[in-house]
Image (cartoon, rainbow, N blue to C red):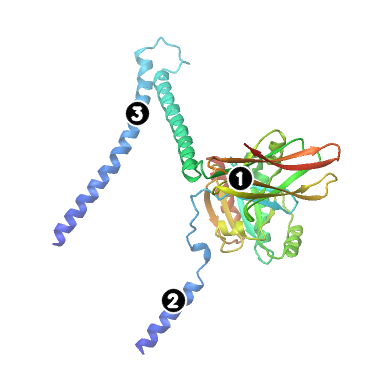
Amino acid sequence: MQNRRISLFLLAVGLAALNLPVAGAEYRLTGKVAPDFALRSAGGTNVRLSEHRGDVVLLAFFGSRCDQCGDQLAALGRIVDTYQSAGLAALAVNVDDDQGAAAEFISAHRTSFPMLLDPGKSVARSYRVDNLPMLLLIDRAGAIRFVHRDYRSGQEAAYMAQTRQLLDE
Amino acid sequence: MNRSFIQSALLLAMLAATATAFPADESAAPATAVTASAAEAPAAEPATDAAAPVATPDTRALDEEIQAIKKDVVDLNRDLFVLEEELLFPANTQVAVFLSMDVGAFFALDTVELRMDDKQVTKYLYTPREAEALLKGGVQRLYLGNLRVGEHELVALFTGKGPNGQDYSRGAQVKFEKSVGAKYLELKISDRQRKQQPEFEIRDWE
């Protein structure tokens, strides 16, 4: 009887661990310099992260099959439109294998900032992207300061506060 | 046993607390000294102009000291960079490939891929800003690596937009002899006016 209880308890703990949100896990690159990259944008021009050194950068990873990605990109668009003149830039990186699906998603979610294509996922790997959407806030010195591994409605306020903090530094 | 353990733990905690407290006091000391002198100085010399900052000599000295430290850091960083390059790429095995562009009316650079002895060593994507810098006369060190003495082959693949704005891809290759000294090669993109076409060549800097 007691053995059964213990095994049930262990099973419950295991299931709880499986359901732990990725957002709670530690992100190893926080505080470190953001790895540099150059990617082609959906518009055809090439974009390099290091060219934005001196700006605060919102770096978002998204995919066409992710439910919250469109909402997050819209929220980022509003933040960028507000703080662009204060030195804020945003880059969104698509990690779809299917370039047709990526193009369709991008045309349905137009933004004022570049949408970059990473079909080989080399950039996503270097940033250890483990969930979509994923947002990194990079300070003016190029260090990763804040990470969000999901998006819920209302989170825009937190993005805004953290962005303002980095812009004020 | 337990009591002595608690006592030693408390002693260690106190030592740690004093160790952390002292540097903070030391760093705070110059700041308080400056403010104190700034506050006291007007009282000692009331005839001086109110707009003139009395603590200027102190702050100037501090500023000079900060600038000197900054310069030392920059110099040290440069020395470390040179040392790192010398260690990683010693002159007897070093090979460097540079890229330059001349005019560029017939070619808008997008990507350069380098293959050394049939193995890709770099693939570089150019942003509009980088391409513009090259057109203004900049020379980019595209690749730095090590090669053994002997014959080697370098292949460069250039992609971009051609004379009519169409996708354009060309290659250039060179066989070169790597001797004991460092080897420098230059990829040069220029315009051939007569043919209205871009020209890609690899030069060996002897």
Residue type of the residue flagged with mark 1: Glu
Disc sitting over residue B78 in the figure:
none
Look at the numbered disc 2 and give the secondary structure of its residue: helix
Question: Residue at the spot x=83%, y=49% of the render?
Answer: B166
Provide residue B98's location: percent of width, then percent of height.
Answer: 64, 40
Look at the numbered disc 3 and give the secondary structure of its residue: helix
Check the image and name the residue furthest to the top. B47
Q: Which corner quadrant of the image does residue A85 belong to? A: top right
Callout in the foreground (1, 3): 1
| A8 on left or right of B12 | right
Disc sitting over residue B30 in the figure:
3
> What residue does disc 1 label?
B177
Residue type of the residue flagged with mark 2: Val
Provide residue A74's location: percent of width, then percent of height.
Answer: 68, 55
Do residues under tags 3 and 2 come within 8 Å of each other at their CB atoms? Answer: no
Q: Chain of mark 1?
A: B
Q: Chain of mark 2?
A: A
| B23 on left or right of A50 | left
Asked if marks 3 and 2 fall on the same chain, the answer is no
| A146 on left or right of A67 | left
> What residue does disc 2 label?
A13
Do residues under tags 2 and 1 come within 8 Å of each other at their CB atoms? Answer: no
In this rendering, does residue A161 appear at all? no
Residue type of the residue flagged with mark 3: Pro
Provide residue B8's location: percent of width, then percent of height.
Answer: 18, 54
